[in-house]
Image: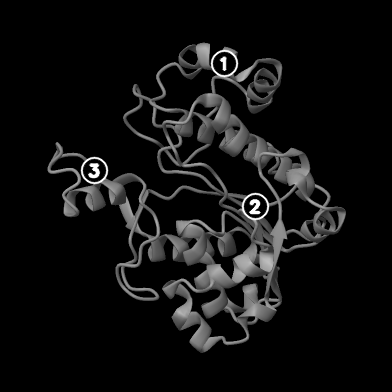
């Protein structure tokens, strides 16, 4: 696997998130011979990308990596963009970069399950579609890895999610057309009709995004990675590192801080929780598995 990642250029979206930060740490620590790691980031207040990079790498999660790879910054390059904008709001120079990278790992997404459908279409489907279009012009790409969810087909009427691509009730192109044709308010009014028995807009759009990625499988090497509920680190770079307050982590934080004195727990329910470091390891291995065994 080390040979596969040597001298490769990698483009990562969602690198500032919980799993994204762990992925960046692992790549820079375990594969110091990668050629370049490009990371997409939106503007954050008045901070420029240099200032944001300095703030980002101050996180304790990177201390071990920096000690082992003190010249890591030579490998890192930030790209300013926005997954909710056409062509990701990229400059021509940055567009040209993405069209030459070896590996794309698309993590960027909104994980707020209570978001209305119009926001999920814009944040999680539109950006994926735009990035795929850009990558179509990349003749060098070894793998486009889309990070989805173990709950991508978590319909109320579904008791088991298999490792296959499910056909959504509305094709991705139809959802994008509806989003463009209707106002946010109009789309909110028909949200429940469109989603049928999906419990939230997050899983509903994950199904559509997976299906959309799969339609490109004859044009580039596509991988779809479905992590479960991501929790604090097990051992790397040290135990119990956490950056997120979403999902089960949020419930634990609320309980131990006594903000929420108690909540109901179904002892028979499966949490499908996995530590963030193990998730990052599996993501890296899965990306390798798409093309690495072919020695490309």
> Which disc is residue 185 wearing?
1
- Splitting the image into 4 quarters, where does residue 93 fall? bottom right
Question: Which secondary structure lies at badge 2?
Answer: loop
Q: Is residue 95 above or below residue 152?
A: below
Seen in the image, is 255 located left or right of residue 96? left
Contact? badges 1 and 2 (CB < 8 Å):
no
The 10 Å Cα crowd at callout 1, few under 14, some 14 to 19, many 20 or more, is few
Of mark 2 and mark 3, the one earlier in the sequence is: 2
Report the front residue among 234 and 255.
255
Q: Position of residue 153 (x, y in %)?
A: 44, 32
Of mark 1 and mark 3, the one earlier in the sequence is: 1
Of mark 1 and mark 2, the one earlier in the sequence is: 2
Q: Which residue shows up at 33% across the image and 45% down it?
A: 247
Q: Is residue 256 visible?
A: yes
Q: Which residue is mark 2?
A: 42
> Which disc is residue 167 wearing?
none
Alpha-carbon distance for marks 1 and 2?
A: 26 Å
The 10 Å Cα crowd at callout 3, few under 14, some 14 to 19, many 20 or more, is few
> Which disc is residue 270 wearing?
3
């Amino acid at each position: 696997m080390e040979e596969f990642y040597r001298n490769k250029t990698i483009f990562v979206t969602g690198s500032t998130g919980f799993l994204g930060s762990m992925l960046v740490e692992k790549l820079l620590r375990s594969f110091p011979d990668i050629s370049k790691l490009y990371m997409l980031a939106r503007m954050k207040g008045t901070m420029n990308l240099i200032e944001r990079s300095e703030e980002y790498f101050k996180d304790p999660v990177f201390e071990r990596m920096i000690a082992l790879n003190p010249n890591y910054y030579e490998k890192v390059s930030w790209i300013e963009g926005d997954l909710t904008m056409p062509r990701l709001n990229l400059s021509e120079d940055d567009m040209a970069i993405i069209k030459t990278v070896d590996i794309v790992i698309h993590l960027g997404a909104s994980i707020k399950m209570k978001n209305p459908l119009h926001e999920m279409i814009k944040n999680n489907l539109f950006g994926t579609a735009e990035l795929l279009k850009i990558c179509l012009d990349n003749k060098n790409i070894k793998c486009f890895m889309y990070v989805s969810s173990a709950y991508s087909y978590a319909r109320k009427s579904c008791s088991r999610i298999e490792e296959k691509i499910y056909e959504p009730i509305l094709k991705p192109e139809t959802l994008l057309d509806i989003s463009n044709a209707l106002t946010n308010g109009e789309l909110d009014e028909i949200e429940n009709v469109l989603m049928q028995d999906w419990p939230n807009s997050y899983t509903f759009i994950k199904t559509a995004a997976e299906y959309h990625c799969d339609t490109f499988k004859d044009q580039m090497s596509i991988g779809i990675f479905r992590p479960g509920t991501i929790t604090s680190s097990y051992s790397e770079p040290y135990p119990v590192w956490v950056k997120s307050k979403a999902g089960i982590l949020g419930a634990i934080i609320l309980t131990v801080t006594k903000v929420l004195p108690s909540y109901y727990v179904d002892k028979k329910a499966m949490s499908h929780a996995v530590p963030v470091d193990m998730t990052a390891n599996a993501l890296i291995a899965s990306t390798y598995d798409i093309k690495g065994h072919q020695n490309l």
